[in-house]
Image: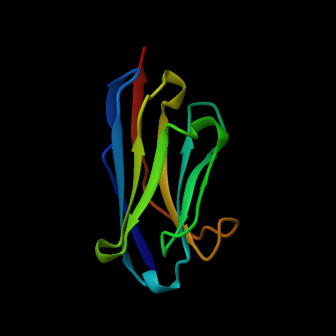
Amino acid sequence: QVQLVESGGGSVQAGGSLRLSCAASGRTFSMYVMGWFRQAPGKEREFVAAITWSGISTNYADSIKGRFTISIDNAKNTAYLQMNSLKPEDTAVYYCSAGPGLATMTHWGQGTQVTVSS
């Protein structure tokens, strides 16, 4: 099994920044991709960003391109999501995920709340 623990959420004003962290433990060698998803109240969970465990390949949702950056520190088994120029519409619970592929994300964290006020 793989355990994922998110941290770094909070409240910020529009235009501000936050950095989310996702610490992975357990059978991480079985994971190829780590990613971030988010779910706003009344909406379905949506993809935000993903990165291969090697850090070579990244993928971003159009809504956050140019504002968010995903990265990974293999030595710490930790993925990060740097969020800049935050907007009120970025308000959501952000979930870290991992799996053998973006279409097969098999492990999820508990989520961390991000609130952006105008």
Question: In this rendering, is residue 96 above or below 91?
Answer: below
Rendering coords of residue 35 (x, y %)? 53, 59
Position of the C terminus, as image quadrant, is top left
Name which residue lies at 33% across and 29% down: 11
Image position, residue 90 (x, y; %) = 51, 31
Residue at 30%, 76% (x, y): give it: 75
Q: Is residue 88 above or below residue 78?
A: above
Q: How is the image coloured?
A: rainbow
Residue at left offset 66%, top offset 40% = 62
The correct choice, above or below, for 26 with respect to 103 in the image is below
Image x and y of residue 96, in percent: 47, 57
**Residue 57: which quarter of the image?**
bottom right
| Total labels drawn | 0
In the displayed orientation, state which residue is furthest to the right.
103
- State the image coordinates of residue 102 (x, y, percent, origin top left): 65, 65
Going by the picture, which residue comes out furthest to the top?
118
* Quadrant housing residue 39: top right
Query: Which picture quadrant has residue 117?
Result: top left
**Residue name at image x 29 percent, y 72 percent:** 76
